[in-house]
Amino acid sequence: ELDGTCNTSSIVLGSFGDGDKSYLINEVRPIWVDFPTTAHAVFEIAADPSGAFTTSGSASMTTGKFDILTDGHWHRISITCVGDYELNRISIEGSPMGSE
């Protein structure tokens, strides 16, 4: 258990995606036990998970989630939080490009 006051901290999700299909991510919803004061997410994409990632967008948390439209084969998300918080899990909504 970690104890103390948090000023700023970051969470970087591992790379996820598919080498054959491009995926459109439209929402990232952290499931907070305790909400941070503020949170901001940076979205990165790459053609290959071992290649260089480039920034594809960013979003501030509104109503407990990050709304974004970003597509790519491989994704990585960094979330920076200000203030104390407790995070249970993260839900990511998206779909393969070309599907309805």
Image (cartoon, helix red, strand yellow):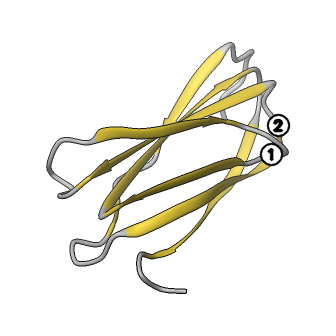
Residue 44 bears which disc, if any?
none
Q: Residue furthest bottom?
A: 100
Q: Is residue 9 above or below residue 53?
A: above
- Per the image, the residue denoted by label 2 is 35
Q: Which quadrant holds the N terminus?
A: top right
Q: Amino acid at mark 2?
A: Phe
Residue plotted at (54% across, 54% down): 69
Q: Quadrant of residue 6?
A: top right
Q: Quadrant of residue 5?
A: top right
- Residue 42 visible in this rendered orientation of the protein: no
Image side of residue 4 versus residue 46, left or right: right
Residue plotted at (73% across, 48% down): 65
The nearer-to-camera label among 1 and 2 is 1
Q: Is residue 67 above or below residue 9?
A: below
Q: Please, what secondary structure does the residue beneath circle 2 have?
A: loop
Q: Quadrant of residue 85?
A: top right
Residue plotted at (22% across, 72% down): 19
Q: Is residue 44 above or below residue 46?
A: above
- Per the image, the residue denoted by label 1 is 64
Tags 1 and 2 touching, CB below 8 Å: yes
- Judge by depth and name the residue closer to the eye, 41 or 100: 100
Q: Please, what secondary structure does the residue beneath circle 1 have?
A: loop
Image side of residue 28 versus residue 13, left or right: right
Residue 23: % across, % down: 41, 69
